[in-house]
């Protein structure tokens, strides 16, 4: 590895750690809301860029490039939905979720679900499911970090993986949402500059966009089609619909992404954040897929398609720029990994440990639980990534399909459908997650030609509607929740009666107890 | 166009255009949202 590359990487780490330290100091000494949501004071540009950089993980530099290399322009179906994912999320649930979460006093995306659908079962199921799936998602980031570092530095994969895990852990332990949000802001800019640089270098190597496409067409015209190499996906609209949905509407079901709504400085922030998210995505999202497609010409003998972007960068760019691109790739990985680990730790400490195991837990104990789980997830991830690393693409598609299928109806209906009740939400989460999981692992994608995201989200949506309607009499939505929903729908300041969330919490406890007694009465 | 079949050209350029139009529509529909940022304790 050249000294220039080392210089750029070290410079990048120093800047990121410096920003993280500054943000941590700024948020230090505040309450739990300050630690978990940055005191709900994050502005539109930071909201947009932390949301986008969290959603765009190491997948974009490994999975997306690999898919473009393997399937040609078919890969752009994923980008087509992804470009609007942040905008859709902010425009559909952003403003209402920000308002409702503050009125309810919810500090995590899982606690928010329990307060909207009052039942401890909601928190237990949603919390456990999220920890499991985010753990998988973290695994993909570790593999991406280890593979990239090994290729660029030339050190062995196990050592590269250990360094990647170590850096991500130190960085995450700095802690706090504000540190994550501000470092994400910086990293999203590094990602954008890095990927645009590779696109420009690839286009200039190939003589422009049209010349590159003509050359690919001469090699294999099916790579230019919307149906993949050898027209392998021809007529498979179920797979295409899933590819479009997974990174567009799917984002609305990802707890680590919707938390960004709760941290906005005001409900109206969603409007300007939607603008910035779209501008950033228009430039960033298609780029890794296109570089993967161009790599068909630049690297005809490539063994591992997921290495396409790394190798194009190494082949075409001078050492200084390769250092910047490597920093961009690590930025994509780290900006997602820190958010995933912070969410996993927060959910483990607040939604599981404090809620179900030790309600009188001190802040110190909660931090210990959070860090212990983060360490455990990282070590288990390290072991799996070392022994038998699956492809980054397959893990990300699995984790995001199941997350989106499980939680999409619960988060959307939480603000838009007043009949969405606790049994409906619980059944929707369980059925959505199960269908997406089974579809992926029973090989039903090939036999039915349907994407797991499509079948999962359709199942969870139908379940939410049917079960909620069927159980309206035995489990109506409590009046205080309906009132809060009405207020969140209206445009205007939050009424004074909701500025202290204690009353809402007490009403919720009472509703959960009454519901439990009633269910006990029915069962008895 | 650009050496691509028509369907692929629509995929590459049509979807981004769709999202830009969606953004314009969203900014128009949400133009009154700033009222949400009014001082919260003014409401009752």
Image (spheres, helix red, strand yellow):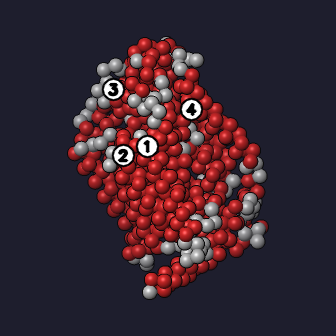
User: Can you tell which mark lies on residue A283?
Assistant: 4
User: Which sits earlier in the primary sequence, circle 4 or circle 2?
Assistant: 4
The residue labelled by disc 2 is A444
User: Which sits earlier in the primary sequence, circle 3 or circle 2?
Assistant: 3
Q: Nearer the viewer, mark 4 or mark 1?
A: 1
Subunit of label 4: A
Subunit of label 2: A
Q: Decide: marks 4, 2 in contact (CB < 8 A)?
A: no
Do marks 3 and 2 both belong to one polypeptide chain? yes
User: Which sits earlier in the primary sequence, circle 2 or circle 1?
Assistant: 2
Q: How far is the residue under mark 1 from the one under mark 3?
A: 46 Å
User: Which sits earlier in the primary sequence, circle 1 or circle 3?
Assistant: 3
- In the picture provided, is A106 more to the left or to the right than A149? right
Q: How far is the residue under mark 3 from the one under mark 4?
A: 30 Å
Residue A263 vs A515, above or below: the answer is: above
Q: Decide: marks 1, 3 in contact (CB < 8 A)?
A: no
Quarter containing the C terminus of chain A: bottom left
Q: Secondary structure at mark 2?
A: helix
The residue labelled by disc 3 is A2
User: Can you tell which mark lies on residue A450?
Assistant: 1
Measuring from the top left, give residue A381's x and y in whole percent: 30, 50
Decide which of A487, A231 is in the foreground and name it: A231
User: Which sits earlier in the primary sequence, circle 4 or circle 1?
Assistant: 4
Q: How far is the residue under mark 2 from the one under mark 1?
A: 8 Å
Measuring from the top left, give residue A122's x and y in whole percent: 47, 68
Measuring from the top left, give residue A154's x and y in whole percent: 27, 30
Residue A60 visible, this orientation:
yes
Quarter containing the N terminus of chain A: top left
Q: Secondary structure at mark 1?
A: loop
Q: Decide: marks 2, 1 in contact (CB < 8 A)?
A: yes
Query: Residue at the location (67% across, 40% down)?
Result: B22
């Amino acid at each position: 590895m050249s000294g220039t590359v080392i210089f750029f990487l070290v410079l990048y780490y120093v800047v990121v750690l410096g920003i993280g330290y500054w943000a941590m100091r700024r948020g230090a000494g505040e309450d739990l809301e300050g630690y978990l949501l940055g005191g709900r004071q994050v502005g539109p540009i930071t909201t947009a860029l932390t949301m986008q950089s969290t959603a765009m993980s190491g997948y974009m530099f490994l999975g997306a490039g690999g898919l473009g290399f393997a399937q040609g322009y078919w890969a752009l179906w994923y980008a087509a939905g992804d470009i609007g994912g942040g905008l859709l999320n902010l425009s559909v649930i952003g403003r209402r979720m920000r308002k409702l979460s503050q009125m309810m006093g919810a500090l995590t995306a899982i606690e928010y679900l329990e307060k909207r659908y009052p039942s401890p079962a909601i928190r237990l199921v949603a919390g456990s499911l999220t920890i499991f799936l985010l753990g998988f998602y973290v695994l993909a980031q570790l593999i991406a970090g280890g593979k990239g570092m090994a290729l660029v530095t030339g050190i062995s994969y196990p050592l590269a993986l250990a360094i990647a895990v170590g850096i991500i852990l130190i960085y995450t332990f700095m802690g706090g949402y504000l540190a994550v949000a501000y470092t994400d802001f910086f990293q999203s800019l590094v990602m954008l500059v890095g990927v645009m640089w590779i696109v420009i270098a690839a286009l200039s190597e190939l003589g422009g966009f049209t010349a590159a496409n003509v050359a690919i067409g001469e090699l294999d015209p099916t790579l230019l089609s919307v149906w993949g190499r050898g027209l392998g996906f021809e007529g498979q609209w179920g797979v295409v619909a899933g590819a479009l949905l997974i990174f567009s509407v799917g984002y609305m079901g990802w707890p680590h992404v919707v938390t960004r709504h709760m941290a906005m400085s005001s409900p109206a922030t969603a409007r300007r954040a939607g603008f910035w998210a779209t501008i950033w995505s228009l430039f960033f999202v298609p780029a890794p897929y296109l570089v993967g497609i161009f790599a068909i010409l630049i690297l005809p003998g490539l063994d591992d398609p997921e290495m396409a972007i790394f190798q194009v960068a190494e082949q075409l760019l001078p050492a200084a720029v390769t250092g910047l691109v490597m920093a961009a790739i690590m930025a994509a990985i780290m900006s997602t990994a820190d958010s995933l680990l912070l969410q996993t730790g927060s959910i483990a400490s607040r939604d599981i440990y404090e809620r179900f195991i030790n309600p009188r837990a001190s802040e110190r104990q909660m931090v210990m639980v959070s860090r212990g789980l983060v360490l455990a997830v990282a070590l288990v991830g390290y072991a799996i990534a070392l022994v038998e690393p699956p492809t980054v693409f397959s893990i990300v598609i699995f984790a995001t399909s199941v997350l989106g299928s499980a939680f999409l109806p619960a988060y959307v209906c939480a603000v838009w459908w007043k009949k969405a009740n606790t049994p409906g939400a619980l059944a929707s989460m369980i059925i959505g997650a199960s269908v997406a999981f089974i579809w992926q692992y029973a090989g039903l994608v090939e036999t039915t030609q349907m994407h797991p995201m499509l079948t999962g989200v359709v199942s969870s949506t139908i379940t939410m509607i049917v079960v909620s309607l069927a159980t309206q009499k035995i489990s109506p939505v409590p009046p205080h929740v309906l009132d809060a929903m009405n207020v969140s729908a209206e445009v205007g300041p939050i009424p004074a009666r909701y500025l202290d969330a204690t009353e809402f919490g007490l009403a919720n406890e009472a509703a959960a107890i009454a519901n439990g007694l009633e269910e006990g009465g029915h069962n008895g | 166009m650009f050496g691509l079949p028509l369907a692929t050209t629509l995929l590459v350029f049509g979807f981004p255009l769709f999202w830009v139009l969606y953004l314009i529509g969203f900014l128009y529909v949400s133009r009154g949202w700033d009222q949400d940022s009014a001082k919260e304790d003014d409401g009752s």
